[in-house]
Amino acid sequence: MPTMTVYFDKPFWVAVLEHHDGAGCVRAVRHVFGSEPTDPELYEFLLRHGVELLRRAESATPVAGDDAAEALGADRQHRRAEARVARRERREAESAERYAQRRAKARAKHRGH
């Protein structure tokens, strides 16, 4: 049964969704809100992103009780590494596109009238 806890972790409000399975393992996902979410905003958030949070929790590394915080940190590091790789690939693609545009513009200039 999943449990969601919202707490203030300076300077942000944080929600932690914990999924406890029958074997005593806990899988957890953390979401950072900016300002304090109201009850209607939490309800709307769960309607829009609840399934995604549950999927992330189910795919997270299972830990036994007290190790949940460490697992959240490892999960966050994994997501950061994936984001870093995606950013690098996107930056390289944009750079290649700009280079191709410069070359096309240079060829057009030398083509004549």
Image: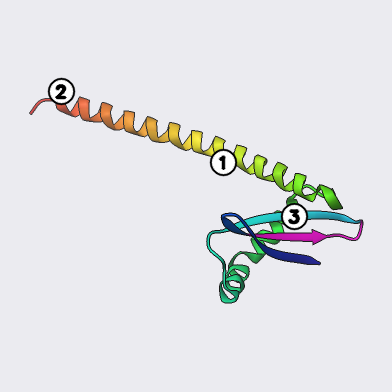
Which residue is depicted at the point 28% across and 32% down?
Answer: 101
Label 2 residue SS = loop
Q: Which three-letter amino acid code belongs to the residue tagged 3?
A: Ala
Report the magenta residues as a range.
14-23
Q: Nearer the viewer, residue 26 or 66?
A: 66
Residue 61 among those drawn in magenta: no
Numbered disc 3: secondary structure = strand
Q: Residue 110 has which mark?
A: 2
Tell me the residue that label 1 is attached to.
83
Left or right of residue 34, residue 17 in this image: right
According to the image, what is the colour scheme of the structure? rainbow
Q: Amino acid at mark 2?
A: His
Rendered residue at 65%/65% (across/down): 50
Mark 2 or 3, nearer chain start:
3
Was residue 15 drawn as part of the magenta stretch in this picture?
A: yes
Residue that sits furthest to the right in the current view: 23
| Disc 2 crowd, CA 10 A, few/some/many (<14, 14-19, 20+) | few
Which marked residue is nearer to the observer: mark 1 or mark 2? 1
Count residues near mark 1 (Cα–Cα under 10 Å), then give few for <14, some for 14-19, many for 20+: few
Q: Which mark sits nearer the N-terminus, 1 or 3?
A: 3
Q: Rounded to the nearest whole Å, what is the CA distance between mark 2 and mark 3?
A: 60 Å
